[in-house]
Image: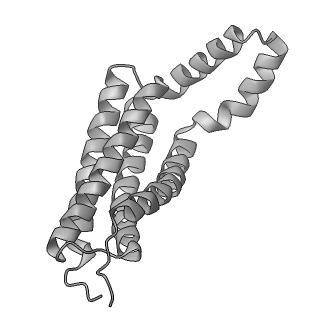
Amino acid sequence: MEEKSSIMPIGIKYGVLSAVISIVYTLLLYVTNLFLNSSLGFLSVVITVLLLVFACREYKTNNEGFMALGTGFKLNMLVMVLSSIPSALFNYIYTKYIDTTISETTKNFQRAQFEKQGMSDEQIEQAMSMAASFTSPEFILMAGLGGGLFMGAIIAIVVAFAMKKVPDTV
């Protein structure tokens, strides 16, 4: 199968679009104080899947309806890399320099969750000391990059598999 178009322009288009959507969505969650609502995180996964499907569909349209699995995976990973890096950097800058209360708000939320579970003060303090490094802007940056790329790879291969179409060979 000879593929005609490059993944680069499509990957850049959807990577930048995904980054912009992610940053705007994250900003909305921060300013409305809904960033701790884990169910809203699911919406960002749905948006990511849709953007990857649209990228694959555009590639297939440019290639007579065909796309190999490997090509789809590379295209989707390009989108994820171009989206994850600026999104993670935005989160870092926002939590480190713009709204430095995010980390403290997260810690207070965690403490309240531990109290709801009926943990003793000693257990809560131990859990809070272990979790302290996970709420820092630096950890948020690394988790955003690593998590975005790891989860992105899983979503990328699933979407590429679902969208692949190779010509019949006789």
| 121 left or right of 68 in image | right
Question: The N terminus is located in which quarter?
Answer: bottom left
User: In percent of the image, x 80 and y 11: which residue is there?
Assistant: 121
One can see residue 101 in this view: no
Vertical side of 114 occupied by 166: above or below: below
User: In percent of the image, x 30 and y 35: which residue is there?
Assistant: 25
Residue 18 horizontal/vertical position (percent): 28, 50
**Relative depth, front residue between 110 and 137:** 110
Tell me which corner region of the image, top left, top right, bottom left or bottom right, holds residue 98.
Answer: top left
Q: How many labels does the image show?
A: 0
**Relative depth, front residue between 41 and 56:** 56
Question: The C terminus is located in which quarter?
Answer: bottom left
| 114 left or right of 2 in image | right
| 169 left or right of 104 in image | left
Residue 132 horizontal/vertical position (percent): 67, 32
Tell me which corner region of the image, top left, top right, bottom left or bottom right, holds residue 156.
Answer: bottom left
Residue 112 horizontal/vertical position (percent): 63, 12
Vertical side of 85 occupied by 12: above or below: below
